[in-house]
Image (cartoon, rainbow, N blue to C red):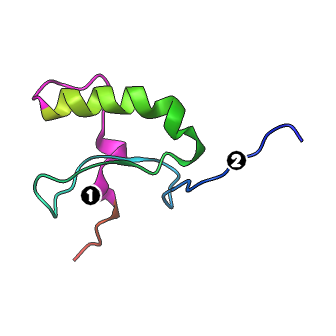
């Protein structure tokens, strides 16, 4: 055996993580759904979240990762 994994590895239908504020719940921010890359992407995710939360322009466009992308059209 080369490797083994154990634990919860959340993912989204589009295989992109959810990063950013939830428009349905003010004050709720998401940083989840990284599949198996969560540990490797944790520092970068934290950095862009802090930038966004403090009013800075994040180094990465968070639009593709926005929680709102799963909202159903009314």
Q: Which of 72 and 56 is in front in this view?
A: 56
Answer whether labels 2 and 1 touch (C-beta < 8 Å): no
* Position of residue 29 measured from the top left corner of the image (x, y, whole percent): 23, 49
From the viewer's perspective, tell me whether residue 69 is left or right of residue 42.
left
Residue drawn 24% across and 26% down? 58
Q: Nearer the viewer, residue 55 or 70?
A: 55
From the viewer's perspective, tell me whether residue 34 is left or right of residue 4.
left
Q: Callout 1 environment at 10 Å: few (<14), some (14 to 19), or many (20+)?
A: some
Residue stretch in magenta:
54-69
* Position of residue 33 measured from the top left corner of the image (x, y, whole percent): 46, 51
For residue 68, which numbered disc appears in the image? 1
Instruction: Please identify the quarter of the rendering in which residue 64 is found.
Output: top left
Residue drawn 29% across and 29% down? 48
Quadrant where the image shows the N terminus: top right
For residue 57, which numbered disc appears in the image? none
Q: In the rendered view, would you say 47 is above or below 53? A: above
Magenta span: predominant SS is loop
Q: Is residue 61 found inside the magenta-colored segment of the image?
A: yes
Which residue is identified by label 2? 5
Q: Nearer the viewer, residue 5 or 46?
A: 5
């Amino acid at each position: 055996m080369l490797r083994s994994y154990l634990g919860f590895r959340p993912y989204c239908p589009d295989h992109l993580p959810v990063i950013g504020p939830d428009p349905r719940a003010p004050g709720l921010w998401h940083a989840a759904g990284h599949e198996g890359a969560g540990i490797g992407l944790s520092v970068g995710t934290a950095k862009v979240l802090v930038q966004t939360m403090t009013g800075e322009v994040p180094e990465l466009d968070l639009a593709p990762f926005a929680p709102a992308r799963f909202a159903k059209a009314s």
